[in-house]
Amino acid sequence: MQEFDTANFSIDRQGLLAALNNCLNSHSAISKLTVLALIDLKNFAQVNQRYGYANGDKVLAELQKRLATIPKKPIYCCRVDGDKFALIISPLLNIQLIPLVAKKIIDQLSGLFVIDDQPILLEGSIGFSASSAGINAEEILQEAEAAAKQAQANQQQYHISEASAIENAQHQIALKQQVIQGLSENSFQLYYQPQISLNDNQPRGAESLIRWLDNNQYKIKPE
């Protein structure tokens, strides 16, 4: 992903939709979720009024940089409105990991921003939506925007769209079927990881681990 700074800091809704469509085409299977997080900042106009629009843009640009570091493999992060940001996470193993993603976003959002040696604290509501059969990029974005509004109305830090909750149930069924198939194909392997004593560097036991291999014998990551 590109580095973000004030030089190329702009609203890019169309770029976001193009990136979303690319993810949907690449991860069409139900086991490969594409998740969109929509971050809607609260009362950011007060920052602009107090410190000026130029300094406000510096804060937004810094926030965009921080958000872009959250996924292990960044896909796309951009402004979609004056003080709204969108972040794509794809693929995500299951929707139950969204609270973990939400915490990472909240941690980046709540970190101090500094203007002229003055600390700035930001707040925002986060809406999440996830891919499902037949959904397109525009619909995912609309669901995320609606979820962010719902989070704000409920005075929550984040909200997951109801459509995504239905998708989660479907995903869990598909995942269970994949596990059953993996068991029948001996795709799970047992490993032992030694536990070494720090006192004398001698083994004192072992931790057992199960690895899940796909059809190409690549390890499926826990997340």
Image (cartoon, rainbow, N blue to C red):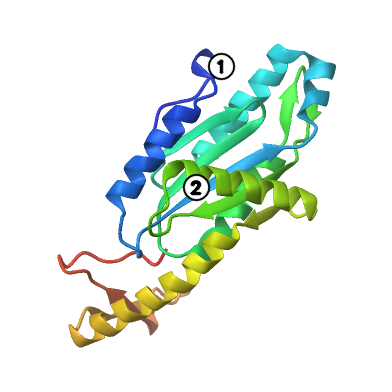
Q: How far from the left and from the top, in percent, is residue 91? A: 38, 54
Q: Does 83 appear above or below 185? A: above
Left or right: 61, with 158 as reference point:
left
Q: In this view, does 198 lie above or below 88?
A: below
Residue with the most extreme front position: 134
Residue 75 percent across, percent down from the top left: 40, 40
The residue tagged 2 is 140
Q: Observer-nearest residue: 193 or 14?
A: 14
Which numbered disc covers residue 20? none
Q: Where's residue 107, x and y in %?
A: 65, 47
- For this rendering, which residue is in front, 111 or 193? 111
- Secondary structure of the residue carrying tag 1 is helix
129 left or right of 120 in image? left
Residue linked to disc 1: 6
Q: Where is residue 159 in the image (x, y as percent from the top left)?
A: 66, 56
Q: Residue at x 59, y 43 (%)?
A: 38
Amino acid residing under circle 2: Ile
